[in-house]
Amino acid sequence: MSDEALSPVLEARNISRHFGAVVALADASLSLRPREVVGLVGDNGAGKSTLLKILSGIVTPSGGDIVIDGKPVVLKRAQDAMDAGIETVYQDLALVDTMSAYQNVYLGREELSKNPLARLFNLVDDRRMRERAREVLDMLKVKIPSINVSVKGMSGGQRQCLAIARALLWGRRIVILDEPTAALGVRETGQVLEVIRDLRQHDVSVIIVSHNMQQLMSVADRITVMRLGRSIATRTVKDTEVSEIVGLITGAIPGDSPEARAAEVAA
Ligand SMILES: Nc1ncnc2c1ncn2[C@@H]1O[C@H](COP(=O)(O)OP(=O)(O)OP(=O)(O)O)[C@@H](O)[C@H]1O
Ligand SMILES: [Mg+2]
């Protein structure tokens, strides 16, 4: 469970973003506490992916603030978000098909060899990489046939788990997942959800977008609902049910007042 007494690791405050005349985000706020999984829901076009892209440094906000550990940050590019401890697992995953599982876990951050000569030639320490990749995958109980085979033949679930493992290996504290199980079968979805639940034990907080309410409620501590570019309500999973969340998404149930939302985010 999340630690409600602790201050948020990440806050998005009154974020807006327009693309020309299109208002993708009008006023979106959310907070993420240590070891918490927050689900972000809303109808198609509600602004979920845009908010995640802003938190990943892919899209810059038109207005609002992003606060990490109580300090305002400006995320101008993806690297800024990574430096701030945020790892995003994209739907297409950005894994390289022809590389092996462990090479993918290390992608872009190959461990430099301890050997000065090898270091000179910028060679990577293959054995060390393999060991660490194995450690992280074991830690998350990710089941893959071998870390040495190319990821080409791997299932969507295995690939998704690998991408999440990568976030852990790089020491990120916040993992952002945009519809991670959208293309997966039942068993694979179960495996990915299990890995997401496990991240808590490694001090990682998660923001996850999904259209599958049952699934989301089985993994999230709180759910923030977006409607037409606004975050309109946040509910604690144990105090709500699917029908209320669906009502908030469709508008059958009105959202909270701006005062209530501000109080929630400040809490
Ligand atoms: N680069 C862009 N240029 C123009 N409009 C955009 C751009 N990105 C997003 N939008 C618009 O902003 C709105 C929000 O889009 P967004 O992708 O954030 O929605 P979403 O909640 O993720 O929807 P879905 O559930 O379908 O993935 C939509 O109207 C979308 O068309
Ligand atoms: Mg989206």
Image (cartoon, rainbow, N blue to C red):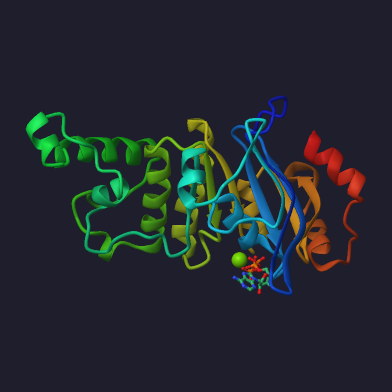
Q: Quadrant of ligand 1?
A: bottom right
Visible residue check, residue 242: no
Q: Position of residue 52 (x, y in %)?
A: 60, 55
Q: Is residue 226 visible?
A: yes
Q: What's the residue at 15%, 37% (across, down)?
A: 127
Q: Is residue 69 left or right of residue 15?
A: left
Q: Position of residue 212 (x, y in %)?
A: 63, 62
Residue appearing at x 35%, y 63% in the figure:
155
Please provide percent x and percent y for residue 265. Answer: 78, 40
| Above-or-below relation of 247 to 177 | below
Residue 159 location, x and y as percent? 37, 57
Q: Is residue 20 left or right of residue 266?
A: left
Residue 22, image quadrant: bottom right
Camera-side residue of 258 and 39: 258
Q: Residue at x 66, y 35 (%)?
A: 33
Residue 24's place in the image compared with 146, above or below, is below
Which of the image's four quarters has the C terminus? top right
User: Seen from this angle, which residue lies furthest left?
Assistant: 117
52 and 151: which is toward the camera: 52
